[in-house]
Image (spheres, rainbow, N blue to C red):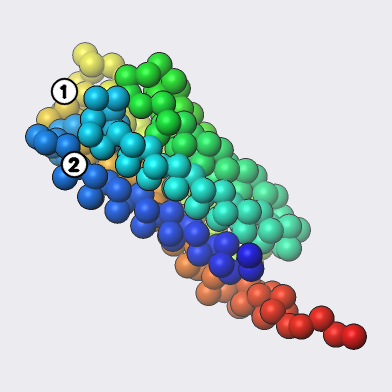
Amino acid sequence: MRLRTRLSFGSIAAIVLWAGFLLLPFMVPGYDSVRETVSLIGEMSSPARIPFAAMLCLLAACLLIFSSGLRDVSKMLGLSGAAANLTTMMAVSSAGVGIFAFPHPLHNVFGLSEIVGYQAPWVLAMTWRREKRFHRVVTFSWLMGALLWCAIMANLGAIDFHSWLWKIEKPEYGLVQRTLFLTWSVWLAGVSVMLMAHRVIRDESARAALPASG
């Protein structure tokens, strides 16, 4: 699979995730996207359990393909592939969340492990910051990394049900949780599109498409 094609799977992953979030709740009578967490869509007793798990496993597959492209770009530039590795970890976490449906004990373990994968944006910005040709990707990743940390901190309000933050968030916690997924999705899609459109990637893809001589 060519490099640009693999990079496109960042955008495809974002589409898969949000198609699931928007469509699967219709399978769950009485589900409220404003108040309730995403995990309740695919909980053990839910009629959407299997489609929800399938959606997250498909998401994981897309993330693995995208991370392989991101890793190859890093190697091509002589830069760290740490962000690609973190994206791979996100793929594992996402699949685990889907396979081990709530309230399985491992569900929350995989859910919390996603915090590691969410570090990919600022890690990419940090490790690519000296690569002037990709300054737009770096700037975008710094911004999305900062927004992701704000979203993470907001979501951690659910850890303490007696905190002032939780009292504010509780009526609309479903929306609060979705801000985290939305921010991550925007980074995925944005980096995917910017890398695919970059001259360096286009030139590399063109060279790879040329027939071998001799």
Q: CA distance from mark 2 to mark 1?
A: 29 Å
Where residue 96 appears, as percent x and y from the top left, is 46, 31
Ranked by sequence position, the earlier of labels 2 and 1 is 2
Residue picked out by circle 1: 167
Would you call the spot at circle 1 few (<14 residues within 10 Å), some (14-19), or many (20 or more)? some
SS at mark 2 in the image: helix
Look at the image and tell me in which quarter the N terminus lies.
Answer: bottom right
- Residue at 62% in and 59% down: 69
Q: Which residue has dot 2 on it? A: 27
Query: Residue shown at 55%/55% (left/top)?
Result: 66
**Label 1 secondary element:** helix
Q: Is residue 151 visible?
A: no
Give the percent coordinates (x, y) of residue 203: 67, 79
Dividing the picture into quarters, in which one does residue 24 lie? Answer: top left
Q: Horizontal placement of 57 versus 129: left or right?
A: left
Of the pair 52 and 71, the residue shown nearer to us: 52
